Image: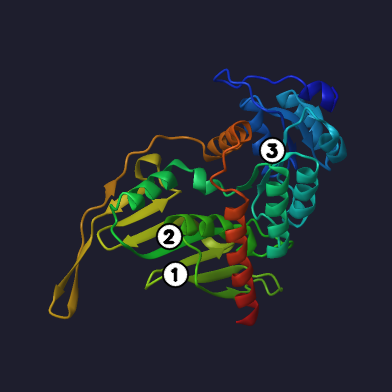
């Protein structure tokens, strides 16, 4: 089946809605999940991957074409591309797609330099195309509920946030743990705080003895006394994916490794003052009800909806650029420490 043959028909998703045709560029470790989701949403037109056997296997499984990148960009029936290639290729692939008039979804990070990120944002705006960054946890039902708790004032004024993303493996050489793990956490912190940090400090540990950071801690300073920390490691003995939010009225924890019944816990702890001595008044944690859903499905659906409607994605190019700016500042701080 050719790319043109596969892409000309707009297939309905499971809700019976017609979807624009999307080609997935990069179908490896993470890209295969994008292939599955866009296929199940009725939007998959073609798979592009340097590993022809992998591309052929996925194309056979999900009933789409195998194509080259140039063929996809030249095909007017393909409205959008989803890029899950190595980060070093994001700028080249995304810029070529935008220049070809395609809407673009690109996995994190948006690019590897702020200048390249700015160029992508400018291209998307010039060509009036959707540019969306794959900050997956911004589409997680638990994070959206946490965001609601903050917006509704349930936690009071924000005082401190800490996000930790730790595991043993997957070890990388093409990027360090900051660029591999931390974009999701930085995106969540910026969304909750509602502003970019005024100060960025960072430190790194080179546990494996090479020039790639294996552990990092990023300290972010915002208006007033509000502070946030992001900790990442791929040489941690246990897995941890947790976001703690401390407010003046209550605290909340988003633990992505917990069961759905306990992914968001609200702690109405209080601090009383005995003269000038603070006294902790702990309270029982309260689980916050959630509706279980797949974050990647919600993210892919959001991209399709934005392509159809022309609305700005939740994690658009400018949001991706804000995260990229923090990554770049943190990377500079790590090198200087």
Q: Are marks 1 and 3 in contact (CB under 8 Å)?
A: no
Element on which disc 2 rests: helix
The C terminus appears in which quarter of the rendering?
bottom right
Q: Label 2, on which residue?
A: 193
Q: Tag on residue 297? A: none
The numbered mark, 1 or 3, whose residue comes first in the sequence reads: 3
Q: Residue at x 78, y 43 (%)?
A: 97
Q: Residue at x 67, y 59 (%)?
A: 171
113 with respect to 6 (left or right): left
Judged by depth in the image, the label closer to the viewer, 2 or 3, is: 2
The numbered mark, 2 or 3, whose residue comes first in the sequence reads: 3
The N terminus appears in which quarter of the rendering?
top right
Q: Label 3, on which residue?
A: 32
Q: Label 1, on which residue?
A: 222
**Can see residue 315?**
yes
Say which of 299 and 51 sits in front: 299
Q: Position of residue 311 (x, y in %)?
A: 57, 38
Q: Are marks 2 and 1 in contact (CB under 8 Å)?
A: yes
Q: Position of residue 84 (x, y in %)?
A: 71, 45
Q: Residue at x 37, y 73 (%)?
A: 225
Q: Position of residue 333 (x, y in %)?
A: 60, 77
Q: Position of residue 57 (x, y in %)?
A: 77, 30
Say which of 220 and 311 sits in front: 311
Question: Circle 3: is it few (<14), some (14-19), or many (20+) Cα within 10 Å?
Answer: some
**Can see residue 113?**
no
70 with respect to 36 (left or right): right
Q: Residue at x 38, y 44 (%)?
A: 145
Question: What is the spatial separation of the Cα atoms under label 1 and label 3, in whole angstroms?
Answer: 38 Å
Quadrant of the image occupied by residue 58: top right
Question: Circle 1: is it few (<14), some (14-19), or many (20+) Cα within 10 Å?
Answer: some
């Amino acid at each position: 089946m050719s790319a043109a043959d596969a892409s000309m028909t707009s297939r309905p998703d499971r809700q019976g809605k017609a979807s624009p045709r999307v080609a997935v560029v990069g179908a490896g470790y993470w890209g295969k999940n994008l292939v599955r989701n866009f296929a199940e949403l009725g939007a998959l037109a073609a798979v592009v991957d340097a590993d022809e056997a992998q591309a052929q296997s996925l194309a056979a499984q999900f009933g789409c074409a195998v194509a080259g990148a140039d063929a996809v960009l030249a095909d007017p029936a393909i409205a959008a591309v989803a890029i899950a290639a190595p980060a070093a290729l994001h700028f080249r692939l995304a810029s070529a797609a935008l220049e070809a008039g395609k809407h673009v979804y690109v996995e994190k990070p948006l690019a590897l330099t702020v200048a390249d990120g700015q160029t992508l944002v400018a291209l998307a705006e010039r060509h009036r195309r959707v540019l969306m960054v794959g900050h997956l946890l911004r589409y997680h039902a638990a994070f959206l509920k946490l965001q609601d708790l903050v917006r509704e004032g349930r936690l009071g004024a924000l005082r401190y946030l800490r996000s930790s993303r730790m595991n043993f493996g997957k070890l990388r050489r093409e990027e360090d743990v900051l660029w591999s793990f931390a974009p999701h956490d930085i995106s969540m912190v910026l969304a909750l705080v509602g502003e970019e940090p005024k100060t960025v400090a960072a430190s790194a540990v080179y546990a494996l003895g090479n020039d790639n950071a294996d552990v990092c801690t990023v300290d972010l300073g915002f208006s007033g006394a509000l502070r946030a920390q992001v900790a990442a490691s791929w040489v941690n003995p246990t897995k941890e994916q947790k976001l703690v939010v401390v407010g003046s009225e209550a605290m909340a924890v988003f633990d992505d490794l917990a069961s759905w019944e306990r992914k968001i816990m609200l702690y109405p702890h209080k601090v009383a003052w005995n003269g000038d001595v603070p006294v902790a008044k702990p309270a029982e944690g309260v689980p916050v009800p959630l509706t279980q859903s797949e974050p990647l499905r919600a993210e892919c659906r959001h991209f399709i909806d934005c392509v159809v409607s022309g609305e700005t994605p939740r994690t658009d190019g400018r949001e991706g650029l804000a995260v990229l700016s923090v990554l770049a500042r943190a990377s500079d701080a790590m090198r200087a420490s």
